Amino acid sequence: MARDREPGGAFVFDLVDDGAADPAGPLAPQAGTAGDGLDGDEPEAEGVAPGEPWAGSDRSLRGVAPVAAVLAIVLGTGLGMDGVRDAARAERMREVHGGVVDVSAPLTETWAWEGDVGSPRAVEEGLGVEVAVLGDVLVFESGDELVALSAATGAEAWVVPLGADPDCGPTGSAGWGQIMTSALVCLAGPDADRAVTVVGPDGVVSAPRVLSAADTRRFGEPRPGPGGTVVRAERTGRAPTSGLGDGECTELGECRGTVRAGQDLTIRAEDAVTGEERWRVTVPFRPTPADQCANWYGTSWDGSSTAVNLSNMIDPGSFGAQITGRLVQLYGCGVEAVITSDGVLIGTEIEPGTGSVESLRNGRYSGYTWSEHVRTVLYDSAGDTVGQIDGYAAEPGAVDGSGPDTLLGVGEPGARVTAYEPDGTRRWDAGVATDAQSFLAQVAGTAVILTAGGTVRGLDLASGEERWAWKDTDPDEYGAELYVARSFTDGQHVLLVVENGYGSAGLVSLDVLSGEVAWEQHGEEAALDGASQIGGGGLLAIDGNLLEVTPDGVRGLG
């Protein structure tokens, strides 16, 4: 008889012998006696020659045959079900953030692509190795080409020639920034004939459109924008001639005071293919600490001179932006704010220089401040405020696709770990001060967090109770404690990328239910190339595959 121990668990079978079921019935041969056949010889009985049929063998074989058949079916079905479950888990890992098909065993290189990765412009501006993910391919500038690599094999899925002085986006720093996008917008060519194209996930390129010089004079320099747009920005309104405030900065980088007057900033998004305006937003100038108005920012929307004028260290007109697939994050003098890809302005309630707004993977946004105490404002997908929480609203670095969307409040020294719903509703309080620094993973009903001192803890996702704790007990060669920089999961393990702050990196795979170490690699035995950490690259998961990106190439790890 079969019984199921728990939903989705293994079947347990009770096999009852005929003789045991009927005490009066004949008994089968006992183990180790004539007729069991376990020693490899033919069964023997009194008066029966070797090789001849035994009188009791027919009934016994008839009784054993169904049991053997049932066992074969059951074992085969069990193995088959395990295979189905593993296949379903692996497929799910291809769809979730930080998901990798298998991290149960030490990683080795599975493929390698060599060449320049990322634009020289981004490297010069200290932005690291900039890449994008379109569907299941990794895309990046390499010289005067746009290259797409298959995440599974490293083969070039497609290559698009770009032309002179290319600038493609939105992109993000490999392993760190927001790199998912639906399309890449590429600008190329000399200023007089600069043109824009849109590249889709399959490598299909739109017809080039020459950018209007009149639009540039009127709306500002063009940059690749989110959602297949070109965005332009320009200071607008009357420039103040007095009342700038008491803000000042020295050539040594010391700033004090406040810049109290300046121009607004108008941002315009146009359809990259047609040139039609999609939206226009004006960000009003707000009084700003002087360090947000220093002219050593180096960029002013991507095109102005980076030279520093030592005679006037304050530049009220300076501004720039980081552009992702969902946001235009503005920074600079008096205009810190965020505009969504739909043209919604959010974050203006955050005082300049005291916080920022980021996009969440659930389609919402979070705006955090660090003035006296860290607090986070939560916005819905339309940009409307829905709640507030204490600490930074941390999303899990990796998920397995199960359980409710969860945010953890982290970053406040001595604060207790608290779990929240996406709208800021409190779910539970861990009850103990853990100095949580990051939310590493949400896997198999466990919230895996990193706390001060480098301890990794597994908390019950439903209650916050601690299930296990792990801390590296082998100090590295520098004597510095390792900290967790990135995390990935295969649904059963959590893979931690640990670093010591000196460029030395290692890998540790933990069983998510017990916290036990499945395997670990440190120093030279680790599969990582130190250049990925020092040179601004990193690890990322695409379609269930783990990739390491460096300025000099890309490797698959598995």
Image (cartoon, grey):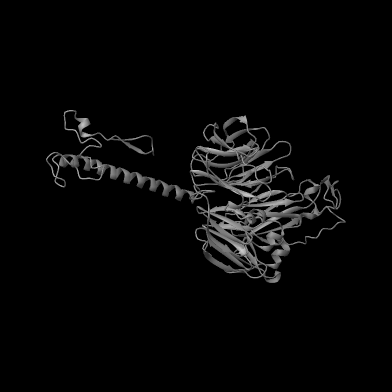
The residue sitting at 38% across, 48% down in the picture is 84
* Percent of width and height locating residue 406: 55, 39
* Percent of width and height locating residue 153: 50, 60
Quarter assignment of residue 407: top right
Quarter assignment of residue 43: top left
Q: Residue furthest left?
A: 47
Residue 1 relative to residue 519: left or right? left
The residue sitting at 78% across, 52% down in the picture is 263
Task: Judge whether 36 appears above or below 263 on screen.
Answer: above
* Percent of width and height locating residue 439: 59, 41
Q: Which quarter shows the N terminus?
A: top left
Q: Residue furthest right?
A: 311
Closest to the observer, 221 or 186: 186
Observer able to see residue 296: yes
Q: How many marks?
A: 0
Quarter assignment of residue 8: top left
The residue sitting at 13% across, 44% down in the picture is 49
Residue 495 relative to residue 222: left or right? left
Task: Judge whether 82 appears above or below 426 on screen.
Answer: below
Observer able to see residue 362: no
Task: Judge whether 225 appears above or below 471 on screen.
Answer: below
* Percent of width and height locating residue 185: 61, 62
